[in-house]
Amino acid sequence: MNVSNPDRCTIRGSAVVAAIASAMLAGCVGAGVEESVLPIRIDYRCAHNKVLQIQRAGDASAAAVLIDNKPVVLPRADSAAQEKYSDGTYALYLDGERAMLEQNSRVIFGPCTAGPLPKAVRERY
């Protein structure tokens, strides 16, 4: 390396930094990840031959479940990994083709699975 010319070192160093940054960012934005798209109405088959019927609001702000043939509407709750709906008594967890319903932190429907759901590519940033 020619230390006698500091401008040349700066330009070369900047080019290396730019190349490394470009390579790192290229891994962040890919062609997309294919994920399940949850339709408005889903029937999940659960353990003990139970069926968990879910009706989601179009904007996913709430979900209704049938419990003892009575609809219970659950508002959307914060969750890091999957869709969660809860009213404090019931908690519904939806993760693609898998679901679980709890009552007072006790599983009452689960594990549950749905048939193949539609897929869509979702970009990750």
Image: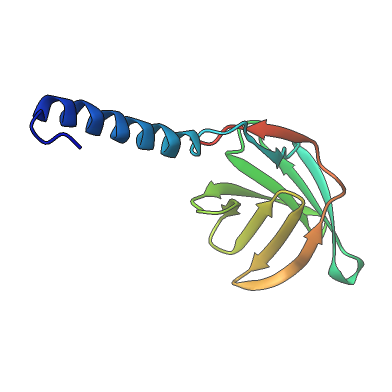
Q: Quadrant of the rendered structure where residue 122 is? A: top right
Q: Residue at x 72, y 37 (%)?
A: 37
In the rendered image, residue 91, in percent from the top left (x then y), is placed at 61, 60
Q: Residue furthest bottom?
A: 106
Seen in the image, is 81 located left or right of residue 5? right
> Which residue is pictured at 61% across the width and 38% down the height?
60
Q: Name the residue nearer the viewer: 56 or 23.
A: 23
On the rendered structure, is 2 left or right of 37? Answer: left
The residue closer to the viewer here, 125 or 73, is 125
Residue at image point 50% right, 53% down: 80
**In the figure, 95 relative to 105: above or below?**
above
Q: Is residue 19 left or right of residue 91?
A: left
Residue 12 x/y as whole percent: 24, 29
Locate residue 25: give its quadrant.
top left
Q: Is residue 28 above or below residue 87?
A: above
Q: Residue furthest right?
A: 49
